């Protein structure tokens, strides 16, 4: 009986029919669990779209890879949408999810002020998981940089 209960808790038993493994809530803050089990804004935009900036970053130490994309209204400079795809632990996925929520509706300059420490604090990440929030900050900056580089290229081509 104990073996069956343990398997069920770990998501190994027949009572679990979800395609993806659920993380154990007692090891993570409830916000991490929520963003991992119900990630916001998962997906991808066309990277060739001139209104899209793509940031692709990774952490070789743990194998986490994060792609975060922003869609920008060219007239206002506001980020109208954001999405991500992350291969990594629950904290990396949660950090990506939070980052996409936080950048929507903000000006480009404003999103560059989002710090990994704010994401880590919001998710109550332990010190060993701070690299996940650092990836999210780096992905935001890389997406903005990519978008701005596209604008420069477009302006140079039109002159």
Image (cartoon, rainbow, N blue to C red):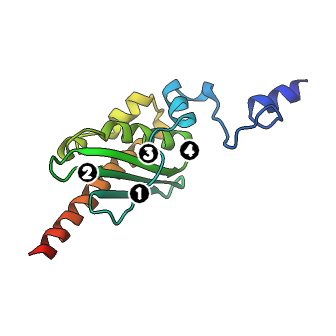
Mark carried by residue 57: 1
Q: Residues within 10 Å of mark 3 (few under 14, many from 20)?
A: many
**Residue at 47% across, 50% down:** 43
**Residue at 15% across, 51% down:** 75
Quarter of the figure with residue 57? bottom left
Q: Is residue 130 visible?
A: no
Instruction: Name the residue carrying label 3.
Output: 131
**Residue at 16% across, 67% down:** 152
Q: Residues within 10 Å of mark 1 (few under 14, many from 20)?
A: many
CB contact under 8 Å: marks 3 and 2: no
Q: Is residue 118 left or right of residue 88?
A: left
- Of badges 1 and 3, the one in the foreground is 1
- Of badges 3 and 4, the one in the foreground is 4
Q: Is residue 28 left or right of residue 119?
A: right
Among the two numbered marks 4 and 2 on one chain, the one whose residue lies closer to the N terminus: 2
Placement of 156 over or under 97, stated as above or below = below
From the top left corner, tell me how far across and down residue 87 is, in percent: 54, 52
- Of badges 2 and 1, the one in the foreground is 2
Among the two numbered marks 3 and 2 on one chain, the one whose residue lies closer to the N terminus: 2
What separation in Å lies between label 2 and label 1 (alpha carbons)? 20 Å
- Residue toward you, 124 or 82: 82
From the top left corner, tell me how far across and down residue 55 is, in percent: 36, 57
From the top left corner, tell me how far across and down residue 158 is, in percent: 12, 73
Which SS class for mark 2? strand
């Amino acid at each position: 009986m104990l073996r069956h209960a343990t398997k069920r808790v770990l998501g190994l038993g027949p009572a679990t029919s979800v395609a993806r493994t659920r993380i154990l809530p007692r090891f993570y803050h409830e916000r991490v669990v929520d963003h991992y089990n119900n990630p916001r804004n998962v997906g991808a935009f066309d990277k060739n779209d001139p209104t899209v900036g793509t940031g692709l970053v990774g952490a070789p130490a743990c194998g986490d890879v994060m792609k975060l994309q922003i869609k920008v209204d060219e007239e206002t400079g506001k980020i109208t949408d954001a999405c991500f795809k992350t291969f990594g632990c629950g904290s990396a996925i949660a950090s990506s999810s939070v980052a996409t929520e936080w950048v929507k509706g903000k000006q480009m300059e404003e999103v560059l002020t989002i710090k990994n420490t704010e994401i880590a604090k919001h998710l109550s990440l332990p010190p060993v998981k701070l690299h996940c929030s650092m990836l999210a900050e780096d992905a935001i900056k890389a997406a903005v940089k990519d978008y701005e580089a596209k604008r420069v290229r477009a302006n140079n081509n039109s002159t």
